[in-house]
Each structure stands twice: as structure tokens, then as C-alpha cells.
Amino acid sequence: MNNPATLNPAAAPPPEAIEVLSPWREGWRVFRSNKAALVGLIALSAVVLMMVFGPSLYGVGAMDIVAGPFVPPFEQSQVMLGTDYLGRDVLAGILIGGRATVMVGLAAAAIAVTLGITIGALAGFFGGWVDTALSRVTELFQVLPALLFAMVLVTLFTPSLQVVVLAIGLVAWTGTARLARAEFMRLKGMEFAQAARSMGAGPLRLMAREILPNALPPLVVSASLIVGAAILFEAGLSFLGLSDPNVMSWGLMIGSNRRNILECWWAVTFPGAAIFLTVLSVSLIGDGLNDAFNPRMHLR
């Protein structure tokens, strides 16, 4: 059967009737077509809502002794997930401890991404001795044992969330720096950068307003991966007792109950599952962002 639009050109929709999606809407279309990334976004949103509204709705402090120690989960209605070795509510610890774990991860990732983009942009844009010097600094931090370096920093100062954030941020920026350096080296020679330079744009404007927006897609994906790594890093430091002992976190729950894991497995399993779910959600979102910023996926 012949297509009427083919036989009669007037029946075909005019070009202006064809919807052209903006880059953000096209990126969102590609992102939501990735079912795993969409599940990760929903799961992470649920975790964030749980941390924001859960403690006030539940009304139990993470450090409060609410029952006897080693109460199994689902045995008493007032302590749904049981109690730990001190008699503290495990569910209250998960609700409140998630705030410290996730906020430390986000803050440390922000420091790492900012530091990495700054150093990588300067090295890639200016080149020469600037690139050589900053590349050597990046390589120095890259070969340092990250966990050992962070442990030394936390040990030298009073263990607190601020010190943990700084320690994680100082050991997690090297990958972003190398990526930003490669992107700035590639983009600074393109036509749009040359045109802006010929119109009198200075180095700062070229880097901030011309090159950086075009280099953001891979950097955003890298930032999402750093968030997950920072959450795991914070959990590891808290597990080792190198965080603020007065602030509940998922890593602190696992570390403080590890000696009683046979009698109180739930106090270790549930916060560990919360860490796993959060990091997996961030990783799935990063995979979706990679698709959203990939021009080949847009062509599909």
C-alpha cells in the first residue's frame, strides 16, 4: 500500500512541526531509556528521603539505649531491625548514620572534583612547564597509598567529619585531574576556542566559559564515580575508628559491632546493605550519565 504522504507532499508534516529536543531533554530521554540507571535514581532518591525525613518520623536517637543488647530483628515491634551490642536501635542508626556517610561522601567528592578540574585545566590549557610541574604533583599523589595517607592525616589531627572530608578529598582528585588535562588539551585547539581567543577572550574566560562547558560531560561521569568511592572510603575510615566517634555512621556501626558479628549479625549486615545499595545506585546513575552525554546514544 502506498503511503499517502508520499503521493501527496502536502499531507506530510511540515519541518517546523517536527519536535527538536533541547540537549538537556535529549539527555534525559537517553538517561531514562537506561532502565538500570533509572532504578539507581529511584533507589538513591529513596535513600535520600529516608535520611532527610526518617530520623524525625522515627523519633529515636542513634545513640539511645532503647532495649537490651542483641535483640534480633523483627522480634520486638519497637525495635524493628533489632539492637546492637549496647542495646541501640539498628534502624535508628541506619536512618541517622546515613546522613554522615552520604554527606561526607558528597563533600569529599566536591573537593576532589574541584581540585582535580582546577589542576587538570591549568595543566592542559597552559602546557609547558606548568603542565610538567602539575603533572608531577598529580603523579606524586597518584602513587601514594590512598588509605594510608588518609589515615595519617586523620591521625595527625583530631578525628572529625571535617578532617575525614579533607583527607578523602586530597587522595581522590588525581583521576579527575588527568581527565580534565586531556580534555583541555584537546579542546583548546578547536575552532570555537580559537574564535573566542581571536575576539579577545583572556585565559580565564577561555577556560571557564568556552572550554569547561564542553569538557563537563566526562567530568560529570567521573564525579559520580568519585561519590561512590568517597562513600566507601568514609565507611572504611569509620570502620577503623578514624572518624568522629560521637557521630553515628554506617561504617561506625559495622566497626563497633564487628567483634560480636556471630551474636549480632544484623547490626553489621543491615548497615553494610545500606552502603552497598547507595554505592550501587550512584554507580548505576553514573552509567546512565555516561549514556546521556554520549552523542552516539543521541543519534540512536
Image (cartoon, helix red, strand yellow):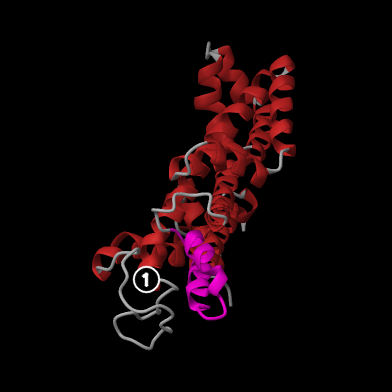
The one nearer the camera, 144 or 240, is 240
Disc 1, SS: loop
* The magenta stretch spans residue 154: no
Q: Residues within 10 Å of mark 1 (few under 14, many from 20)?
A: many
Quadrant of the image occupied by residue 130: top right
Residue at 52% from the left image edge and 81% from the top image edge: 263
Estimate the x, y position of residue 197 in percent, counting from the top left: 58, 15
Image vertical order of residue 209 relative to residue 162, above or below: above
Task: Identify the residue at the far bottom of this view.
Answer: 75
The one nearer the camera, 117 or 256, is 256
Estimate the x, y position of residue 120 in percent, counting from the top left: 64, 29
- Check disc 1 and report the residue beneath it: 88
The three-letter code of the residue at mark 1 reads Arg
Q: Which residues are magenta?
A: 249-274
In the image, 253: left or right of 87? right
* The magenta stretch spans residue 269: yes
Residue at 35% from the left image edge and 65% from the top image edge: 50
Residue at 51% from the left image edge and 69% from the top image edge: 257
The one nearer the camera, 282 or 172, is 172
